Image (tube, rainbow, N blue to C red):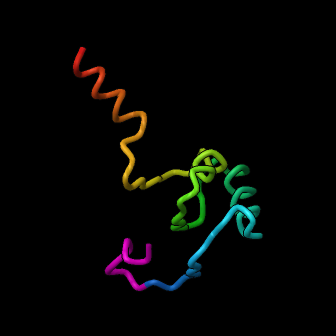
Amino acid sequence: IASLIAPLIYSGDYRPYFTIYDPDFAEICKTHNELRGQYMPSTVLGVTNPYFLKALEYWPNVISVGHMGYNSNKCDKESNE
């Protein structure tokens, strides 16, 4: 995940695991829900649990690797009609 911001110098909190049971998850959710995703603090959060997409539904930017997603299939179906 840290390599995504290269060549910027990384100076933050790095955790090999971040789960819904982490105390900071509650704080992130609270801030996220209060701001509805607007003006969120600069954060890069790498997770594999799809629950994060539901819990943080207003997160302004999501990079998904390895999944086509619903919107991609919808565009393909519309172009074939």
**In the rendered image, which quarter is residue 63 located in?**
bottom left
The residue nearer to you, when weighing 50 against 56, is 50
Q: Name the residue rendered at 56%, 81% in the picture.
A: 14
Residue 10 appears left or right of 20: left
Q: Which residues are magenta?
A: 1-9
Residue 38's x, y, as percent? 59, 51
Tell me if 46 is positioned left or right of 19 in this view: left
- The residue most toward the left is 80
The mark total stands at: 0
Q: Residue furthest top?
A: 81
Q: Is residue 70 left or right of residue 20?
A: left
14 and 40: which one is in front?
14
The x, y position of residue 70, in whole percent, is 42, 34
Q: Is residue 7 above or below residue 29?
A: below
Image vertical order of residue 49 relative to residue 11, above or below = above
- Quadrant for residue 49, please give it: bottom right
Residue 42: in magenta span:
no
Residue 56: x and y in percent read: 63, 50
Residue 45 picture location, percent across and down = 54, 66
Q: Does residue 5 belong to the magenta stretch?
A: yes
Question: Is residue 66 placed above or below 45 in the rendered structure?
Answer: above
Which residue lies at the image location 46% right of the left edge and 53% below the top edge? 62
Towards the viewer: 11 or 1 = 1
Name the image quarter holding the C terminus: top left
Q: Residue at x 47, y 53 (%)?
A: 61
| Quadrant showing the N terminus | bottom left
At x 73%, y 51%, the residue is 34
Specify the quadrant of the image occupied by residue 28.
Answer: bottom right
